[in-house]
Amino acid sequence: MDNWPAGFLWGAATSAHQTEGDNRNSDWWSFEQAGLHFVPEASGAAVDSYRRWEQDMDLLAGAGFSDYRFSIEWARIEPSRGELSSTALEHYGAMVRGALARGLRPLVTLHHFTHPLWFHEAGGWLAPDAVADFCRYVEAVLPLLAGVERVCTINEPNILAILPALLAGDDTHGLPAPDLATGTVLIEAHHAVRELLRERAPHVRVGWSVACQSFEPELGAEDVCARLAHDREGRYLEAARGDAWIGVQSYTRTRVGIDGPLPPPEGARLTLTGWEYAPRALGAAVRTAARVTGVPVVVTENGLATDDDALRRAYTAEALAALRDAMAHGVDVQGYFHWSLLDNYEWGRFGPTFGLVAVDRTTFERHPKPSLSWLGALGPRPPH
């Protein structure tokens, strides 16, 4: 494969809460102020992208990328139940228009982990009106989607569904299991929004993104691994059957023994998050997602938490090689988004640096790393 297919998406991703700063009406802001055990560091001003989003888009477009995945913050759009912020609506509308003006196709995520505080206090996804509340918010942002080709309804619902366990203080090794009741409602919400967008914004291709952990069984643990994979990602992949595409978010692999997930092997190279360095997991992840869903795949997140940018490039090159191999064997992959454009707030701390661009957290000055131009140059080449 000399080049990526025509129309292939080539971009980087961010999320609102992780980059914007001062998202004071969200549940995560309240968790941070309360000093909950899973948020040891507060986001504060994050990396000030609410004011500096144009700089961020300029860096991305200038490096040769054609696509940008970013999220709209529900807590800014609807700070109180039923109260819409015209300022926030205009802000995100300007972001969509700004991306298009720079030749960046926006892939807009409607929900990236955070909720309005009022939604959380009313019971979150287990409240009787949760799906209706989410649909009301989506209806409010429909006018912003003019020119947007793809929308992600909910980012990593299988990770979002572990929030009840985190709030309960679960200290299980690794991530807790997704809460089944929460996950069921998230699937309902995804399907409801999918139908809403099909009716009201038929130009939009709708999908959602799933954290795909590339489960690998040890000898004798095949059945345990299959059950674990289904419960932690399979049911969320199955929910994407009938979508326009499925988003795959892959960083590492998970080895499974007869008693469940195993830690990384002794002596394995670890990232700043403590995950095993396993770039070829991306190939396994897209194969699984395509097999289970039967729909085209977009890699909506893939990257490495490291302070060594040369290692980031090495990881990404190997991950892309695994992606190309899956495509050569028939997997319909339609795009790749690197996580992340910026070093940002990684859900409790700033330490794990995934970005193609470093940010001085005192001045907020952006410092592109060599990986930004390197990766931008690897994207689809225009036809001769």
Image (cartoon, rainbow, N blue to C red):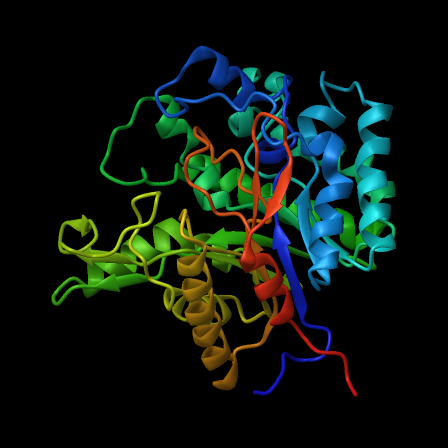
Q: Nearer the viewer, residue 68 or 179?
A: 68
- 321 with respect to 101 (left or right): left
Name which quarter of the figure residue 103 lies in.
Answer: bottom right
Name which quarter of the figure residue 39 lies in.
Answer: top left
Residue 110: percent from left, percent from top: 68, 41
Q: Nearer the viewer, residue 190 or 95?
A: 95
* Residue 147 visible in rendering: no
Q: Residue at x 37, y 49 (%)?
A: 232
Residue 214: percent from left, percent from top: 35, 61
- 296 with respect to 201 (left or right): left
Residue 105: percent from left, percent from top: 77, 58
Q: Is residue 129 above or below residue 201?
A: above
Q: Residue at x 41, y 35 (%)?
A: 351
Q: Nearer the viewer, residue 350 or 117?
A: 350
Question: In which quadrant will I find the C terminus?
Answer: bottom right
Q: Is residue 290 above or below residue 47?
A: below
Question: In which quadrant will I find the N terminus?
Answer: bottom right
Q: Is residue 96 above or below residue 220?
A: above
Q: Residue at x 58, y 65 (%)?
A: 374
Q: Residue at x 66, y 80 (%)?
A: 5
Name which quarter of the figure residue 333 lies in.
Answer: bottom right
* Residue 190 visible in rendering: yes
Residue 303: percent from left, percent from top: 47, 55
